[in-house]
Image (cartoon, helix red, strand yellow):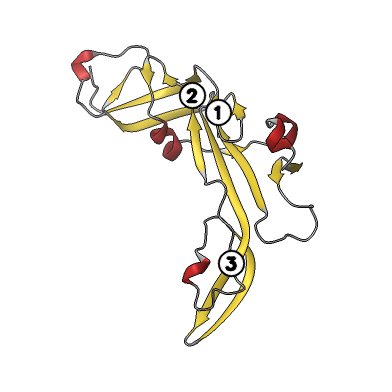
Amino acid sequence: PVTGSGRVAADHVDPVNDGRTVIVAGKLEVGKPARDPELGISADAALLFRDVSMFQWREQCDGGACRYETAWMRQPLDSRKFRVAAGHENPPFPFADAHFAGEIRLGAFVVDPGLIATSAPAVVYPVHAAALPPNLAATFHEVNGILLTGNGGAPTLGEIHVGYRVVAPIATVSLPGWP
């Protein structure tokens, strides 16, 4: 049964609450690790976030004048839409930001990963190029737990950085509005 505050015990699912909005609190548990299938990175975590940035051209226009500079950007910029596209072509963005989850449980409840993504804090999760499959390990190197392409000196157009964050399975959370 639901209490006056809408809270229910996490230790069992009561069918009487089907269709009701309830609040469940407790420790997250992970049945299987979260895994990024594109890069092969796994973490014993409720959620694994992949954060990607690429060194690319960006256009900044003020009235009729535009200037072009390279910068680290978290989203792809379509250089075909620049006023002066020639000489400012951005390569395709190879990977997008994403999050991955294994089976997440809160007591007897299976948790929607989207609820965790907005309800629990994520912390930096350092990774190593040695953890990558051989074809990707040849492309990336690691600096301070972040995967990088390029030579590690001055960035070049199309160079990417891939970092990870996790929500630990031992996090104690309260999930409001959980039907």
C-alpha gap between disc 1 and disc 3:
33 Å
Q: Say what secondary structure mark 2 lies in.
A: loop
Residue 89 is labelled as 3
**Quadrant in the picture for residue 42:** top right
User: What's under tag 2, amino acid-wise?
Assistant: Gly
User: What's under tag 1, amino acid-wise?
Assistant: Arg
Residue 27 location (% of width, % of height): 47, 21
Residue 164 location (% of width, % of height): 61, 39
Q: Is residue 116 visible?
A: yes
Q: Residue at x 57, y 45 (%)?
A: 51
C-alpha gap between disc 2 and disc 1:
7 Å
Q: Residue at x 70, y 30 (%)?
A: 131
C-alpha gap between disc 3 and disc 2:
38 Å
Badge 2 crowding class, 10 Å Cα cut-off, few under 14, some 14 to 19, many 20 or more, is some
Q: Residue at x 42, y 40 (%)?
A: 118
Residue 112 location (% of width, % of height): 38, 29
Seen from the viewer's position, the closer of residues 117 and 71 is: 71
Q: Residue at x 75, y 42 (%)?
A: 141
Tell me the residue that label 2 is attached to.
Answer: 102
- Residue contact at pointers 2 and 1, CB within 8 angstroms: yes
Tell me the residue that label 1 is attached to.
Answer: 35
